[in-house]
Amino acid sequence: MSNRMERANSEIQRCLIQIIKDKMNDPRLDKIVSITEVNVTPDFKYCKAKVSVVKPEEMADVVKVLQKSEGYIKRELAKMVDMPQVPKINFVVDKSTLNSIRVEEILRNLNIPKESEDDNK
Protein backbone atom coordinates (compact mmCIF):
# COMPACT_ATOMS: atom_id res chain seq x y z
CA MET A 1 0.00 0.00 0.00
CA SER A 2 1.33 3.42 -0.85
CA ASN A 3 2.23 5.98 1.76
CA ARG A 4 -0.53 8.25 0.46
CA MET A 5 -3.18 5.57 0.99
CA GLU A 6 -1.88 4.75 4.48
CA ARG A 7 -2.06 8.42 5.46
CA ALA A 8 -5.58 8.72 4.04
CA ASN A 9 -6.72 5.57 5.87
CA SER A 10 -5.30 6.68 9.22
CA GLU A 11 -6.67 10.23 8.89
CA ILE A 12 -10.16 9.01 7.99
CA GLN A 13 -10.05 6.49 10.86
CA ARG A 14 -9.05 9.21 13.34
CA CYS A 15 -11.82 11.52 12.11
CA LEU A 16 -14.49 8.80 12.15
CA ILE A 17 -13.65 7.93 15.75
CA GLN A 18 -13.85 11.59 16.70
CA ILE A 19 -17.19 12.09 14.92
CA ILE A 20 -18.77 9.02 16.55
CA LYS A 21 -17.53 9.85 20.05
CA ASP A 22 -17.98 13.63 20.07
CA LYS A 23 -20.65 14.62 17.55
CA MET A 24 -23.21 11.84 17.47
CA ASN A 25 -25.81 11.88 20.24
CA ASP A 26 -27.41 8.50 19.62
CA PRO A 27 -27.67 6.53 22.90
CA ARG A 28 -26.97 3.28 21.03
CA LEU A 29 -23.52 4.63 20.21
CA ASP A 30 -22.02 4.85 23.65
CA LYS A 31 -18.31 5.33 24.21
CA ILE A 32 -17.38 1.70 23.58
CA VAL A 33 -17.65 1.85 19.76
CA SER A 34 -14.36 1.78 17.89
CA ILE A 35 -13.25 1.92 14.27
CA THR A 36 -10.53 -0.72 14.03
CA GLU A 37 -9.56 -0.41 10.38
CA VAL A 38 -10.29 1.81 7.39
CA ASN A 39 -9.62 0.95 3.74
CA VAL A 40 -10.11 3.60 1.08
CA THR A 41 -10.15 2.75 -2.61
CA PRO A 42 -7.37 4.39 -4.67
CA ASP A 43 -9.88 6.72 -6.37
CA PHE A 44 -11.22 7.87 -2.95
CA LYS A 45 -14.81 7.04 -3.94
CA TYR A 46 -15.43 4.28 -1.40
CA CYS A 47 -14.29 3.49 2.09
CA LYS A 48 -14.79 0.38 4.22
CA ALA A 49 -14.70 1.03 7.96
CA LYS A 50 -14.53 -1.95 10.31
CA VAL A 51 -16.51 -1.42 13.52
CA SER A 52 -15.83 -3.07 16.85
CA VAL A 53 -18.00 -2.97 19.96
CA VAL A 54 -17.22 -4.26 23.45
CA LYS A 55 -20.61 -5.97 23.72
CA PRO A 56 -20.84 -8.35 20.73
CA GLU A 57 -24.62 -8.68 21.01
CA GLU A 58 -24.96 -4.97 20.13
CA MET A 59 -22.71 -5.16 17.05
CA ALA A 60 -25.45 -5.46 14.42
CA ASP A 61 -27.48 -2.58 15.90
CA VAL A 62 -24.44 -0.31 16.02
CA VAL A 63 -23.53 -1.01 12.38
CA LYS A 64 -27.15 -0.30 11.32
CA VAL A 65 -27.14 3.03 13.19
CA LEU A 66 -23.83 4.02 11.59
CA GLN A 67 -25.06 3.04 8.10
CA LYS A 68 -28.21 5.13 8.54
CA SER A 69 -26.09 8.06 9.74
CA GLU A 70 -23.64 7.77 6.84
CA GLY A 71 -24.79 11.04 5.24
CA TYR A 72 -24.24 13.02 8.44
CA ILE A 73 -20.90 11.31 9.08
CA LYS A 74 -19.77 12.03 5.52
CA ARG A 75 -20.67 15.75 5.87
CA GLU A 76 -18.76 15.98 9.15
CA LEU A 77 -15.82 14.13 7.60
CA ALA A 78 -15.76 16.60 4.69
CA LYS A 79 -15.31 19.44 7.20
CA MET A 80 -12.40 17.66 8.89
CA VAL A 81 -10.29 16.29 6.04
CA ASP A 82 -8.73 17.97 3.04
CA MET A 83 -9.40 15.49 0.27
CA PRO A 84 -10.41 15.94 -3.36
CA GLN A 85 -13.45 13.74 -2.73
CA VAL A 86 -14.97 12.39 0.48
CA PRO A 87 -15.62 8.67 0.04
CA LYS A 88 -18.91 6.84 0.52
CA ILE A 89 -18.49 4.99 3.81
CA ASN A 90 -19.55 1.38 4.26
CA PHE A 91 -19.54 0.27 7.91
CA VAL A 92 -18.95 -3.46 8.47
CA VAL A 93 -18.54 -5.68 11.52
CA ASP A 94 -14.94 -6.37 12.48
CA LYS A 95 -15.03 -10.16 12.68
CA SER A 96 -11.52 -10.40 14.13
CA THR A 97 -12.78 -8.81 17.35
CA LEU A 98 -15.66 -11.30 17.53
CA ASN A 99 -13.24 -14.16 16.92
CA SER A 100 -10.87 -13.03 19.66
CA ILE A 101 -13.78 -12.71 22.12
CA ARG A 102 -14.87 -16.25 21.24
CA VAL A 103 -11.34 -17.65 21.72
CA GLU A 104 -11.10 -15.87 25.07
CA GLU A 105 -14.41 -17.45 26.16
CA ILE A 106 -13.20 -20.91 25.17
CA LEU A 107 -9.93 -20.48 27.03
CA ARG A 108 -11.72 -19.20 30.12
CA ASN A 109 -14.02 -22.24 30.15
CA LEU A 110 -11.20 -24.79 29.97
CA ASN A 111 -10.58 -26.61 33.21
CA ILE A 112 -6.81 -26.70 33.31
CA PRO A 113 -5.41 -27.41 36.75
CA LYS A 114 -2.78 -24.98 37.98
CA GLU A 115 0.74 -26.31 38.33
CA SER A 116 1.92 -26.81 41.85
CA GLU A 117 5.45 -26.08 42.99
CA ASP A 118 6.18 -29.83 43.27
CA ASP A 119 5.52 -30.34 39.55
CA ASN A 120 8.25 -27.87 38.57
CA LYS A 121 11.10 -29.92 40.17
Image (cartoon, rainbow, N blue to C red):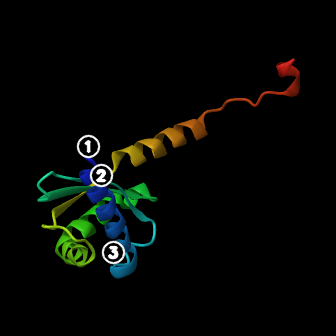
Is residue 25 shown to the viewer in this render? Answer: no
Quick check: 2 left or right of 104?
Answer: left
| Residue depicted at x 18% and y 67% | 83
Q: Which residue is mark 1?
A: 1
Q: Nearer the viewer, mark 1 or mark 3?
A: 1
Residue for point 30% across, 52% down:
6
Q: Nearer the viewer, residue 70 or 101?
A: 70
Residue 7, placed above or below residue 30: above
User: Residue 39 appears at what percent x and percent y?
Assistant: 25, 52
Sequence-wise first label, 3 or 2: 2
Give the left or right position of residue 29, taking residue 112 as reference: left
* Side of 44 where 91 appears, left or right: right
Count of labels in the image: 3
Q: Eyeballing the image, is 1 above or below 15?
A: above
Could you tell me if the residues under marks 1 and 2 are in contact, i.e. CB atoms within 8 Å? yes
Quarter of the rendering containing residue 40:
bottom left
User: Which residue in the structure is indicated by mark 3?
Assistant: 19
State the CA–CA distance, disc 1 to disc 3: 26 Å
Q: Secondary structure at mark 3?
A: helix
Quadrant of residue 24 within the rendered picture: bottom left
Between disc 1 and disc 3, whose residue precedes? 1
Q: Which residue is mark 2?
A: 6
Structural distance between the alpha carbons of marks 3 and 2: 20 Å
For label 3, the crowd category at 10 Å Cα-Cα, with few meaning under 14, some 14 to 19 and many 20 or more, is: some
Q: Nearer the viewer, mark 3 or mark 2?
A: 2
Q: Amino acid at mark 3?
A: Ile
Residue that appears at 38% across and 44% down: 96
